[in-house]
């Protein structure tokens, strides 16, 4: 399995309050901006009231207040591990004006079959995306996948595995034991699930023609509905980090646990109870992305050198991602509210509505769990899998939408909406099908 597929997956198992109001954020001018107010109605169907369709990004230099009124740390010019983040170029804006030919999409994608790449690569090319695609793959990647990559203009980065050099106090045995001992070349000093960060830095640095904006992302659970950098896409300023659903904050154990233990509880006023930022998708200019990946690697080496920062779990790169932002170590980064920017991180909504619908079928209709989970949602038609009026998450053709009702460009964690959508409806849609993938199988 990919070393990164599980990032942000912890949204699935949490107990989410059914009604929450999202407080106003402070914009860069200091004024309050009305935000999205996500609610679950009495039928446990997710609805979203849009109070302001022009929600601004949250600059790191002026971050949103916590519920208790505490303010996070101010922006820094050097990270705690010595990475210089003061270059004015990191704050530059790039506007491709709809031409994605210089853009780059990167991801780590080890252990996947051709069907995953058809959905990801074929889906991306089907949007009209003309830029670079760089994907890390396992040493035993199949010939049909490499043939497909060649046909679709994908640069494969075949991984090499080596023994780790960092010490680990994680328990021996269990599902993570092999990972505890196996690292990715040339980074034996950090665990393998973290290696995508310095590796992608190297891939980007080595690509002389990758001059435009960069999207790094999870591969298995993401889909493309529009060209991320195509016509109508917004300019990219510095780095963009993407918030999960407002119900999900850094109070969650995936951030609270590791950060409290590694950084000490005295640091909690800086990062606790803030909007959860997903480390599975990040966008930036070339300069900002290179610096972000360098900062992540620097912090990861520091964690690897301290046994108190060793955790036998999959998603602690998300802890680091949030920690760097909320402690002012990524001053060039902007936090993008959920369902507003290029990436729609849909996992929390997906988990809530899927589980509620599955449970309703079991409770009210007496269906077995597997049968109840494999049904279209209320309001589905011959064109869609979920009613747009019932949930306010999709349009009449089944495409995910932004908070203002327009079509999302990139959807991350789309599989959280369950079996019917992911395994029955989606594979039949032309926008994720690619004849070139089928030709590669022959």
Image: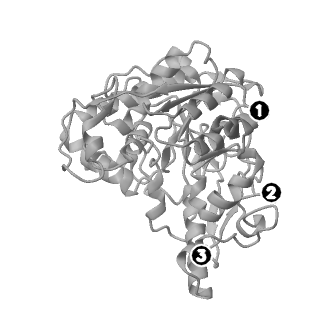
What quarter of the picture does the N terminus occupy?
top left
Q: CA distance from mark 1 to mark 2?
A: 19 Å
Secondary structure under the numbered disc 2 in the rendered image: loop
Secondary structure under the numbered disc 1 in the rendered image: loop
Secondary structure under the numbered disc 3 in the rendered image: helix
The tag on residue 164 is: none
312 to the left or right of 362: left
Q: Give the mark, 1 or 3, whose residue is nearer the N terminus.
A: 1
Instruction: Name the residue tied to disc 2.
Output: 397
Which residue is at a point 29% across and 48% down the rendered structure image? 176
Q: Residue 8 location, x and y as percent?
A: 47, 50
Which residue is at a point 64% across and 53% down the rendered structure image? 35
Q: Give the mark, 3 or 2, whose residue is nearer the N terminus.
A: 3
Is disc 2 surrounded by few (<14), some (14 to 19) or many (20+) residues within 10 Å?
Answer: some
In front: label 3 or label 2 = 3
Q: Residue 178 location, x and y as percent?
A: 27, 43
Q: Can the viewer see residue 23?
A: no
The tag on residue 371 is: 3
């Amino acid at each position: 399995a990919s070393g990164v597929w599980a990032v942000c997956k912890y949204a699935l198992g949490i107990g989410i309050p059914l009604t929450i109001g999202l407080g106003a954020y402070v914009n860069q001018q200091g004024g309050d901006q009305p935000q999205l107010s996500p609610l679950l109605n009495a039928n446990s169907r997710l609805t979203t009231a849009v109070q302001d369709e022009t929600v601004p990004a949250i600059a790191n230099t002026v971050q949103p207040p916590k519920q208790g009124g505490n303010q996070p740390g101010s922006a820094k010019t050097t990270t705690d591990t010595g990475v210089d983040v003061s270059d004015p170029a990191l704050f530059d804006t790039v506007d491709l004006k709809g031409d994605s030919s210089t853009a780059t999409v990167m991801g780590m994608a080890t252990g996947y079959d051709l069907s995953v790449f058809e959905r990801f690569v074929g889906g991306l090319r089907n949007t009209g995306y003309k830029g670079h695609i760089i994907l890390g793959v396992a040493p035993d990647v199949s010939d049909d996948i490499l043939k497909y990559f060649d046909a679709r203009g994908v640069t494969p980065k075949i991984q090499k595995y080596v023994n780790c050099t960092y010490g680990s106090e994680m328990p021996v045995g269990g599902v993570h034991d092999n990972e505890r001992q196996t690292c990715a070349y040339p980074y034996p000093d950090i665990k393998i699930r973290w290696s995508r960060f310095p590796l992608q830095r190297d891939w980007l640095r080595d690509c002389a023609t990758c001059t435009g904006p960069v999207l790094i992302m999870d591969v298995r659970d993401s889909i493309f509905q529009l060209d991320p950098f195509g016509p109508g896409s917004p300019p990219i300023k510095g780095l963009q980090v993407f918030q999960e659903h407002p119900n999900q904050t850094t109070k969650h154990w995936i951030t609270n646990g590791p950060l409290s233990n590694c950084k000490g509880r005295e640091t909690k006023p800086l990062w606790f109870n803030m909007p959860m930022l997903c480390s599975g998708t990040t966008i930036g200019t070339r300069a900002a992305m290179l610096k972000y990946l360098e900062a992540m690697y620097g912090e990861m080496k520091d964690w690897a050198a301290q046994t108190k920062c060793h955790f036998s779990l999959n998603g602690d790169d998300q802890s680091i991602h949030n920690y760097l932002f909320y402690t002012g170590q990524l001053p060039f980064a902007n936090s993008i509210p959920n369902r507003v920017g290029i990436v729609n991180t849909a996992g929390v909504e997906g988990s809530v509505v899927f589980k509620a619908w599955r449970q309703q079928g079991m409770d009210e209709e007496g269906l077995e769990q597997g049968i109840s989970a494999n049904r279209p949602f209320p309001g589905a038609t011959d064109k869609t899998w979920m009613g747009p009026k019932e949930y306010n998450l999709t349009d009449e053709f089944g495409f995910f939408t932004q908070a203002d009702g327009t079509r999302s460009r990139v959807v991350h964690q789309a599989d959280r909406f369950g079996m019917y959508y992911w395994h029955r409806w989606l594979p039949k849609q032309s926008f994720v099908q690619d004849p070139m993938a089928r030709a590669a199988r022959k």
